[in-house]
Amino acid sequence: MPDTIATGLTASEIHELKNFGGRLTALGVNFAVCDFEGRPLLLCKTGAFETDPARLAKIAHDCLKHPDKKDKPQDDSSAVSRYISSVLVPLTGEKKQTGIAVVIDLGNTLDMNNQQQSHLLTELLRFFVEKFTAGRKSIEQMDMISSELAQTYEELVLLYKISTNMEIVEPDANFLQMACDSLTEIVGVEGITILQEKTVDDKSRFILVAGAGVIDIDDRTTLLLHSRLQEELNKGKEVLLDSDFDGSFKYEWPKNIHNIIVVPLTSKVKTHPSQDTGYKQPLTARVIGMLVAINRLDKPDFDSTDAKLFTSVASECAVFVENNRLFGDLKELFIGSLKALTRSIDAKDRYTRGHSERVGFISKWIAEHLAEEEGLDQEQIQKIYLAGLLHDIGKIGIDEKLLCKTGRLTAKEKNRLRMHPSIGANILSGIRQMRDIIPGVLNHHERVDGKGYPAGLKGNQIPLMGKIVGLADCFDAMTSERVYRDTMSVDKAIAEIENRLGTQFDEKIATVFLKSDILHLWDLMQEGAVKTYGTDDFTQYGSAAIGTLIT
Ligand SMILES: [Fe+2]
């Protein structure tokens, strides 16, 4: 039997055909199966006569070309043989028909005039074909159901994976990239991307933030995508689907695009109060991003199942982006409130203006230089920065007159002033998220020789955070104009710290600080610490630091 039998028939179907063919030979006829081109796939012979291959191919070909003639004996007065043929079953799954023909060659061994014999064989073939077709259809249906179940399962796994990765400490781009990668694992596309609305130079634009595969979207295409998607949404559609598969495109696309799906990432936004009534308008949906995929690989076009899956994924992405934005707003509000609070405390004394923010900045500097030696990660450094920012928050409970007093302090006044670390720690202890920074606030006036306050802790009894903030506090105090002395130069402050190694300051920490580029730190502080020595805006650093407390 030729190898071409493999054209879409299963092993059990081939076995069934062989069995049927074998039984027919007992009736003295030859049985053949031919492919769509008329090539023989299977031939069961009685041995009583030869089947002419060319004749067989023509019969099979005619049968497949004119299926209405099936099951009918082929009349051919010039031939010694007569044939009964039928289309066995069109093999579905592809657009081109790939059915096969079954042919009974009656040869010349049967009585040509015995219509009854011919009729019986025709009926036999018809029953076989019906049975075979029914079997094939049920297998196909089972395959289809099984494939749909597998697809649904994969889609559910994908949506579960996406929803369980919704940790808002993740940057948007990481999450959106994960969504793209996950989608391409179960949907064959040439390229996929997510464009997110961002503000660039005070203008709102859609920027490519994640993608997989091959997809090239320039600024012009981005604008087109947005306007066309909006046009479809205005018509009540949920997605933009366009393809040249069943006809021409609705819109004009770059030549490399044969089919495309664009799904919106939408956010519910408040509109401005009505000018007439002053009442707030209902929330409206706004496109904050677009999920775009081009050129379906294992299907001719994107279909409604794809649209449903893409819409679900886009919806999850939009929720993530929106939550991240709200979380960002919350962090900015929080750090803004903390800075406002510390500024109001610093403002009690004109000599300490900006002191808290500078101490936060210097604490961060020291922590970063100590990171390797002390095994500090970014989260710990951020907490040290916040402890520096809030180190004097307890001064809120100290009389302004005392904070601004120019003369010598009495013992009672000194004791009162020395309560500010404990007051600060008490204030923060009421806020669960702030507890990690209390050691920096409570211990920033401790000294390694035990002569500090409030507890008089010595050496390693003082938490690292307290030592760092204490050093940062002193450096800023030394280099800032104070009520009791003029600004000390940076060199003098460095010399003063060297003098106090092992008494006021922890030797290891202060040495690391002294070895750092303090003049550069000083320059940065003169710029108001607006920029860090990296590329991040310092305001964003504060928000990120707050994020570590909230999550
Ligand atoms: Fe202090």
Image: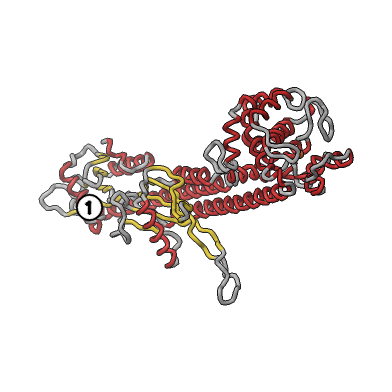
Please name the residue shown 53% across and 65% down the image.
284
> Relative to 138, does residue 489 appear above or below in the rendering?
above
Residue 374 x, y percent position in the rendering: 66, 26
Figure quadrant, ligand 1: top right
User: Which residue is more in the foreground, 382 or 110?
Assistant: 382
Q: Which residue is mark 1?
A: 63
User: Which residue is more in the foreground, 390 or 101?
Assistant: 390
Asked if ligand 1 lies within 8 A of label 1, the reply is no
Residue 471 x, y percent position in the rendering: 71, 32
> Relative to 337, does residue 277 appear above or below in the rendering?
below
User: Which residue is more in the foreground, 301 or 5?
Assistant: 301
Please name the residue shown 41% across and 60% down the image.
229
Query: Can residue 124 be seen in the rendering of this structure?
Result: no
Q: Is residue 216 left or right of residue 69?
A: right
Q: Is residue 414 left or right of residue 239?
A: right
Outermost residue on the right side: it is 412
Quadrant of the image containing the N terminus: top left
Residue 97 x, y percent position in the rendering: 28, 51
Q: Secondary structure at mark 1?
A: helix
Identify the colour scheme used: secondary structure
Mark 1 crowd level (few <14, some 14–19, many ≥20, 10 Å Cα): many
Query: Can residue 136 be seen in the rendering of this structure?
Result: yes
| Dot 1 amino acid type | Cys
Residue 387 x, y percent position in the rendering: 71, 39
Q: Quadrant of residue 379?
A: top right
Please name the residue shown 74% across and 27% down the image.
505
Total marks placed: 1
Quadrant of the image containing the C terminus: top right
Outermost residue on the bottom side: it is 276
